[in-house]
Image (cartoon, rainbow, N blue to C red):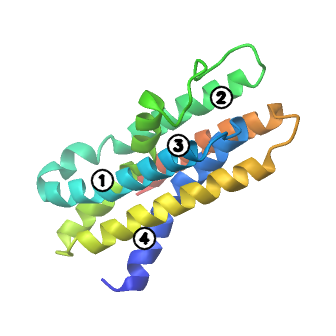
Amino acid sequence: MNPLEIILIAVALAMDALAVAVGLSLKFKWASYRQFFRLSFHFGLFQFFMPILGWAAGHHIVKYIHDYDHWVAFLLLGYIGIRMIQESSGEKNFFDGQDPTKGKWLILLSLATSIDALAVGLSLSMISVSIWVPSMVIGLVAALFTLLGMYFGNLLRTRETRYLEIAGGLILIGIGIKILLEHTVL
């Protein structure tokens, strides 16, 4: 596998992380560099490890994961997106006042954005490609795209954030639908 192919795969996988980072940034004004670090680090870390897990599992687990991985990502992203839209009215607080760059939300978001990387790892094992370099590139690109998404999401914020919160929720739902459609069409 040549370096250009690895970079293209990494960029394709990082698009979900980028869109989720933008969507969350439309909802939350990030107050510290810790939040930037936590989200980008965990998205990158999960994107790094998921191809390794998929590669290690190889042919044995593909029949179990392939049937429902897209549904898991769709349900997680769809649920979060719907709740963000509901919260835009100001009546409900989806994250219950919690920072989505901490705890269970961070883990759920990291899993939802990295499930496709598991399938890439499975694919690479089937064509006997070493996983270490591609996995490192995938993780680094995901972390970088997450940082960029958070930064640009913050720039797009205005005083009236209701519509931006709806847009952020729709972005997450859209990503979930995209993942679902990609897997059901193939």
Kind of residue at badge 3: Gly
- Residue at 62 percent across and 24 percent down: it is 83
Figure label count: 4
Q: Quadrant of residue 122?
A: bottom left
Q: Is residue 131 left or right of residue 39?
A: left
| Mark 3 and mark 2: Cα distance apart in space | 14 Å
Choose the circle earlier in sequence order: 3 or 4. Answer: 4
At mark 4, the secondary structure is helix
Percent position of residue 159, x then y: 88, 36
Give the foreground label among 3 and 4: 4
Q: Quadrant of residue 147?
A: bottom right
Where is mark 1, residue-wise? Answer: 50
Where is mark 2, residue-wise? Answer: 84
Give the foreground label among 1 and 4: 1
Which quadrant is home to the N terminus?
bottom left
Where is mark 3, residue-wise? Answer: 176
